[in-house]
Structure formats: structure tokens, C-alpha cells
């Protein structure tokens, strides 16, 4: 009796086990064996992939109209200055002393300066200098600062101490004062301004990049790359630098208006752009004594500087809010 019960129990167990399997092909696969994998695949399909920088910027412009207007304004400024020979109604260097200090008119929309030159045409050409000095020294200084920040943050030790102490020395002095010192030492001119702004502006970028690298080098993928023998230069170039790009984009939009203001200040003090070339800061300097006679010729370049700087700042704030992981929530 007991043996019959045991045989019956064994048969039932065998039937239940066989019922839980399906035969497809040549392998025995439990029917529920693939369920966890299917659930996991379904869960992964519901997780949205990380947005690229391009997608994040598009999303920012869709939701932040102020940033969109700022970007459009910056593009307009760049286009009209690049195509100044086509857009400018008059030659900015031709003098007509019989029409000096005229107010706005149909022929001269923003009037004329103390030499009878068209103010609007000079503003279009002067914008070239202001934008060039704002953009290219920023690129140079950020390249230097990024390279030094990557080295200091990744290698650490004495190299880090030397680079950061040098950055501290530069940041201890006002950037405008250092730029004035370099300009007075090397002489006036645009090349001097380029050199001055490139030298004095890299320290802030280096400190920000260093802090990013200190965080990134502790990530698992960096430790994995180090453990399998990947060269340090390759790790910096392929794993760390790409993750610093969002921060660098924000820094660029913040540094450009600072350099534009510095150039305008140097030109206003007479050590920036030199006649016959012009810039917005130099135009304010040349026309300030005629403010009561022709206020438009003085206020127009000043307002232009204000609009461009504010546009860059609004765009930089929007990019920071969108690209900075700590601010996404």
C-alpha cells in the first residue's frame, strides 16, 4: 500500500514537472523561465533614454521663451556685424565736417558723430571688434583653463597645488586691472587686448573644470578603465572631458559678456581699440562729451552693449538650469 502511494506521488510529481515545461526545438525550457527577462525588458523600454546636449537645448528653447529671444538677438548681432559691408548704409570712415553732430534723420538713422561720420555704420563695424574680442579670447582662455583644470584634477598632488596656487594669484587681482597692466606694458591695440583677456580669464575655468574632474574620476567607468590599463590621457580625452562639455558651454556664455564689458572698459579708458578702427566702448568714449548735443550717438552703442550682455546672461542662466544635473529637479 505504501509503495503504491509512493509510486502515485512520484507519477503526480513527474506530471507536474512535465507540465511546467514546453518543448520547442531540442531544449527543455520552463514556461515561466523567460518571464523575469520579459519583465525587465518591458521596464527598460519604459525608461526614456538620456537626452543628448542637442535635445536638451531644443527642449530648453521650447519651454524658455526668454532664452529663445536672447539666442535670436545674439544671432542677429553676429549676422549684422559679419555682413556689415552689406548692411551699413555709409562708409564708417568717411568724414563730413559740414554735417557733424547731426541728430537722427532719414539719411543717418542714428545721426552723425563729431567728425560727421554715420553712427549706425560705425556701430555695425564696431560690433565686429567687440564680438571678436568677446568670443575669441574666451575660447583661448577656456582652452587653457580646461587643459590645466583636467591635469590638476586628474593627477592631483604637486601639479594640482602649483596650478591652483597660480590660479589663486590671478583671481586675487581684478581682471580689469590686470588687463590694464598688460595693455600699458605691451602697448595699445587689439592684439594686446586679445593677449590680456586670454591671460587673465583662464583661472576661473580651471577651478570649475578641476572640481568636475575630482567628481568624475571617482565614477565606476573611470575606475574600470584604469583597472584594465587604459592610458590616463585616453581616459581624460574619452571619459572625463566629454562629461565636462555641458559645464563648458555654460561657462562660455557667461565669459563672453564679461570680456565684452572688459574690452568696452579698456576702450573707454583709451587703451583698447584705437582710431581709425572703432568699437562700441570707443564710440561711447569719443561721444561722451557731446551727450547733451546728440544723446543718441552716445546712448546707442551703450544700449547695444547692454542688450548683448543681458542676452548672453539670460542664455547662460537658461543653459545652466537645463544642463547642470544638480539643478534639473
Image (cartoon, rainbow, N blue to C red):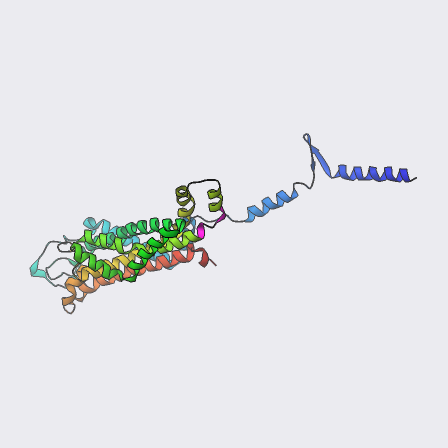
Q: Quadrant of residue 206?
A: bottom left
> Which of 313 and 102 lies nearest the eye of the viewer?
313
Q: Is residue 289 magenta?
A: no
Residue 44, position in %: x, y?
56, 46
Q: Is residue 239 rendered to the left or right of residue 140?
A: right
Residue 156, position in %: x, y?
39, 51
Look at the picture and state if 300 lies above or below 238. below
Question: Which residue is at a point 82% across and 39% down the rendered structure image?
Answer: 12
Q: Which residues are magenta?
A: 215-220
Residue 209, position in %: x, y?
38, 53
Q: Quadrant of residue 298?
A: bottom left
- Residue 291 appears in the figure: yes
Residue lying at the far front of the rendered structure = 158
> Which of 278 and 326 lies nearest the eye of the viewer?
326
- Residue 109 appears in the figure: no
> Which of 225 and 160 lies nearest the eye of the viewer?
160
Look at the picture and state if 181 lies above or below 39. below
> Which of 207 and 117 lies nearest the eye of the viewer?
207
Residue lying at the far left of the rendered structure = 98
Amino acid at each position: 500500500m505504501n509503495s503504491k502511494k509512493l509510486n502515485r506521488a512520484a507519477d503526480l510529481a513527474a506530471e507536474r514537472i512535465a507540465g511546467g515545461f514546453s518543448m520547442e526545438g531540442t531544449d527543455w525550457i520552463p514556461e515561466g523561465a523567460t518571464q523575469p527577462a520579459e519583465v525587465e525588458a518591458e521596464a527598460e523600454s519604459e525608461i526614456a533614454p538620456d537626452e543628448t546636449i542637442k535635445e536638451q537645448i531644443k527642449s530648453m528653447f521650447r519651454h524658455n521663451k526668454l532664452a529663445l529671444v536672447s539666442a535670436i538677438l545674439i544671432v542677429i548681432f553676429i549676422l549684422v556685424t559679419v555682413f556689415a559691408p552689406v548692411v551699413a548704409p555709409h562708409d564708417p570712415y568717411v568724414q563730413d565736417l559740414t554735417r557733424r553732430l547731426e541728430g537722427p534723420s532719414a539719411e543717418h538713422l542714428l545721426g552723425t558723430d563729431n567728425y560727421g561720420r554715420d553712427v549706425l555704420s560705425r556701430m555695425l563695424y564696431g560690433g565686429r571688434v567687440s564680438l571678436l574680442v568677446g568670443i575669441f579670447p574666451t575660447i583661448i582662455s577656456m582652452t587653457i583653463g580646461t587643459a590645466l583644470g583636467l591635469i590638476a584634477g586628474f593627477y592631483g598632488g604637486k601639479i594640482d597645488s602649483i596650478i591652483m596656487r597660480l590660479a589663486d594669484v590671478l583671481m586675487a587681482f581684478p581682471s580689469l586691472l590686470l588687463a590694464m597692466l598688460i595693455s600699458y606694458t605691451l602697448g595699445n591695440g587689439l592684439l594686446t587686448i586679445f593677449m590680456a583677456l586670454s591671460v587673465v580669464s583662464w583661472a576661473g575655468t580651471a577651478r570649475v573644470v578641476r572640481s568636475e574632474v575630482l567628481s568624475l574620476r571617482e565614477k565606476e567607468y573611470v575606475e574600470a578603465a584604469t583597472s584594465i590599463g587604459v592610458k590616463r590621457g585616453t581616459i581624460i580625452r574619452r571619459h572625463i572631458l566629454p562629461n565636462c562639455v555641458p559645464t563648458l558651454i555654460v561657462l562660455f556664455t557667461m565669459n563672453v559678456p564679461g570680456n565684452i564689458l572688459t574690452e568696452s572698459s579698456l576702450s573707454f579708458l583709451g587703451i583698447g581699440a584705437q582710431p581709425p578702427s572703432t568699437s562700441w566702448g570707443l564710440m561711447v568714449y569719443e561721444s561722451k562729451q557731446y551727450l547733451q548735443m546728440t544723446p543718441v550717438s552716445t546712448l546707442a552703442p551703450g544700449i547695444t552693449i547692454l542688450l548683448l550682455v543681458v542676452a548672453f546672461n539670460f542664455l547662460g542662466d537658461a543653459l545652466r538650469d537645463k544642463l547642470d544635473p544638480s539643478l534639473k529637479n
